[in-house]
Image: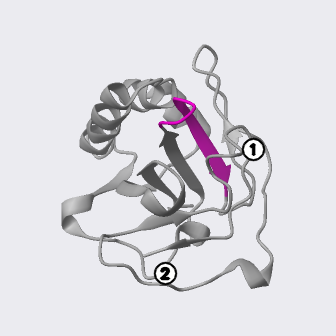
Amino acid sequence: MSSYTDFYFGRGENANWLGSLRGECCPENFLTVPPSRLALAATDESTFRPAVADTLGVWEDERLGQAYRRELGWPWPWYTSHDSSWIIVFDPAPRAVFVTVGGGVTWHRIDPHDPQFPEGDDPLGPDKHLRVASRSGRTALGADAADAPETHHYTHLRR
């Protein structure tokens, strides 16, 4: 069964969509493919961005699915990352990587010394899905993103 992952730099209104994956986007694969493991363990932008780019570059070579770079445009028929299986972001304020499960509502901080994914789902309520367009690509929106670096409940992701 295919799963979907979206990568962002930052959280909140200034988040920048970097690319997406479709296919075998399970935690085990992220932890065994070297560039994706490096992205999960990143503590700075100069590591995270190239590691995500390399992940997008090797995903198909590893026969794990398809990779979609930002320059090709948003690949999904849905408007937000809420329908994606995983959302992986690097937040520059705490200099850490965060993930959320299945479009969930809780950001889980990844330990760079022992990168592990959270288990289970964080389902969104029906009122969490909002469709909002912006001029500069996909943006992950969140209330108080900078104020809650460890666990962040976001309201929606927008275009």
The residue at 60%/13% (across/down) is 113
Here the colouring is one colour
Q: Quadrant of residue 3?
A: bottom right
Q: Position of residue 114 (x, y in %)?
A: 64, 17
Which numbered disc, 2 or 1, marks the residue that appears first in the sequence? 2
Which amino acid type is marked by label 2?
Answer: Trp
137 left or right, relative to 12: left
Say which element carries label 1: loop
| Magenta residues, start to end | 92-101
Give the position of the C terminus as an image quadrant.
bottom left
Q: In which quadrant of the rendered image does the N terminus lie?
A: bottom right
Q: Position of residue 61 (x, y in %)?
A: 26, 40
Q: Which residue is mark 1?
A: 151
Tell me the residue at 34%/44% (across/down). 63
Q: Residues within 10 Å of mark 1 (few under 14, many from 20)?
A: some
What label does residue 78 carry, if any?
A: 2
